Amino acid sequence: MNIGDKAPEILGKDENGREIKLSDFAGKKLVLYFYPKDSTSGCTAEACSLRDNYGELRKQGYAVVGVSTQDEASHQKFIQKNNLPFPLIADTDMQLVKQFGVWGEKSMYGRKYMGTFRTTFIINEEGFVEKIFLPKEIKTKNHGEQILKK
C-alpha cells in the first residue's frame, strides 16, 4: 500500500468479532496503525500515546484503529489493561498485514522470524492513503503527537 492507493473496504474483525469497514469512517481521517504484539513494551507505549491523544485526534477529525495478528481475546485484555478507547483488529489470518505490505522477515539478536513491521497509515476522508509512518519514523512514546503534527 502506497500513498495515493485506495484502502480496502473490509478491514477485518475487531476484538468483539464485529466487522470493521472503511465506510464506517466516511468523512473522517483514519489512523490505521499496525503493531507487532499486544502487551509488549513498545506496542503498549504506542497504544497509550494514541489513547492519551485520542481526544485531540477526534477533535481534528481522526478515528483510530489498531491492527495486529493476535486474536480477539488477546486484544480484549490489551484494551482493558490499558483503557484503550479505539478498536483493535484481530488479523489472525494475516490478510490485512499482507495487503498493506507490513508483514515480512524481521531479525532480533541475530534470530530471523516473520512478523509485523510497526507502520501507521493515515487514510483520508475519501479512503485514500495520505501519509505513511514507517517503522524507523515511529516514536512509540510520542506517536499520537507525531500524527497531530504531521
Image: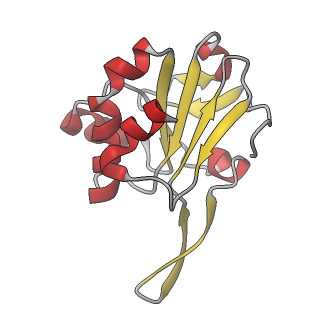
For image coordinates 32% across by 18% down, the residue present is 55
Q: In the rendered image, is residue 21 in sight?
A: yes
Q: Is residue 142 above or below residue 51?
A: below
For image coordinates 46% across by 34% down, the residue present is 149
Query: Number of labelled discs?
Result: 0
Corner quadrant of residue 123: top right
For image coordinates 69% across by 54% down, the residue present is 101
Q: In the rendered image, is residue 73 in sight?
A: no
Residue lying farthest right?
5
Corner quadrant of residue 104: bottom right
The colour mode here is secondary structure
Position of residue 119 in the picture relative to residue 6 (left or right): left
Q: Position of residue 46 (x, y in %)?
A: 35, 46
For image coordinates 39% across by 26% down, the residue present is 86
Viewer-closest of 94 and 58: 58
Q: Position of residue 61 (x, y in %)?
A: 50, 14
Residue lying farthest bottom?
110
